Image (cartoon, rainbow, N blue to C red):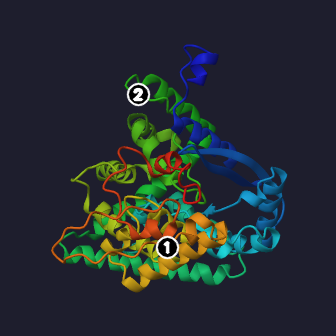
Amino acid sequence: MEVELLRPGTIPPESKIVAHDVGTLYAEIDASYLGCGLQWEQDGEVFFMVLEFTQLDSRHTREYLALKLHECLEKYGLSKKLCILSMDGAGNCNTTATNLVPLNPHFKQATRKKRTVKVAVSATQVEEVVLDGTPPNQEDADLAHLLDEDAAERKSLRNQLPDGAARNEHDTAVVSKIRIAAIQVTASQGVTINSSESKSGLELIPRVCVLARKLHDSAPVVSSFAKLVHADKMIVSQTQMLARRCTSRWNSDYDSLDTALILEQPVRKLLKEKDLNLKAFKLTDAQWNLAADLCDVLEGANNSEISNICCVAAYGGGLVLNKYIDLVPNCEAYEFSIVLAPNLKLDWFKKHGRSMTQICRIREIIVACYDEIFKTTAQSAQTPTPAPEVVPWDLELPAPSQIPNNINSYLDTPPLASLNGKTVLQYWAAGRAAQPDLA
């Protein structure tokens, strides 16, 4: 809308194009940045903005990252408003939250940090989780080089941490264990992959990603490919180039595969040009089909005819997701968000297999947190809940009504059947006047 108002008739670039260009820009900058984003709620709506990119000129230790984050929040006067940190599961991110506490007493790391849960199925799981460890064709020197380079980069990133070497060894063991479990369980259910499928899957992502790199770095390849793309009148997308792979950036594998599929015909023609010596990166028809299946899975498409290798990868992804779900009690924000959904409350945990001991623990924590924040105000804590009347056992009782702004009464009443089309935030925004503390 803003673009149309400022420059009528201008066609904005697709989001994938912008993401690719930004990713390429930062991939070519020999510097590291800490990106800080701000998310907040107002009138039942969630807003997000990029706060700042802070250049990092020292090792990415937990103390240094915590200091730079704190300086950024102080700069914008947001330290006292910090509620939750949303991060990935990297070790230096977790320890950054720990080291932020001495700098910002308003932030309670132990119960306020939030992990960003990775999508259950990642492109690299076809490479790392599903396969049986069959090595790539050693004749493909560029392919082997990419795998070695990728492993070295991941090892380097992990080794920045004090326990990096041990973590790297642990992660390798976990991947191997999950891979074996996924293959065995799916095989028992009739979903099997043979050595040929394993080899084909193992080679897919490295082949596409090495080619993407050559398309950016080799002038002859860039020139030839640009001509092929320009000559192909069937391409309706704005995509003109394969996206680079960045091992430290999620979904870059998907971006490389997706752009390769969009530009499939120019890529096929490029790989046939003998003068460019790109034979090592040629994909078989089965690999092109696998790339399409994998993109469908990553996009969440409802495709019941995906290949077995993607089915096994999906199961492996579920095993990885379960490890994150087991960590939910470590962060009260997840449990609080469920309890404070009026159509879920504590009943959700009962329906999903939590024991009464666990449910009681959740209730105790949320009530204690509520009392701590609002100092047991007269309305929320001092208003007693009336004792239930004694009635005949066969008399149907009406659903109890909630005492406004009372956390115990809120938890004691049953969940709402529906929010009448509202989101949870919109529900609480509408009830803020009557229940300011709960909202």
Where's residue 335, x and y in %? 48, 69
Quarter of the image for the N terminus: give it. Answer: top right
Residue 10: mark = none
Q: Amino acid at mark 1?
A: Val
Task: Locate residue 268: give its quadrant.
Answer: top left
Q: Amino acid at mark 2?
A: Ile
The residue tagged with tag 1: helix, strand or loop? helix
In the drawing, what numbered circle is on residue 235? 2
Residue 180 % position (x, y) = 35, 79
Residue 88 seen in the current view: no
Answer few, some or many: residues within 10 Å of disc 2's Cα (few below 14, many 20 plus, some between 14 and 19): some
Indicate whether 313 appears above or below 226.
below
Q: Is residue 329 visible?
A: yes
Report helix, strand or loop for mark 2: loop
Kindly identify which numbered label has been placed on residue 328.
Answer: 1
Q: Identify the residue shown where x is 57% and y is 46%.
A: 214
Which of the image's four quarters has the C terminus? bottom right
Identify the residue at image location x=70%, y=53%. 36
Answer with left or right where residue 237 lies relative to residue 142. Answer: left
Q: Nearer the viewer, residue 75 or 404?
A: 404
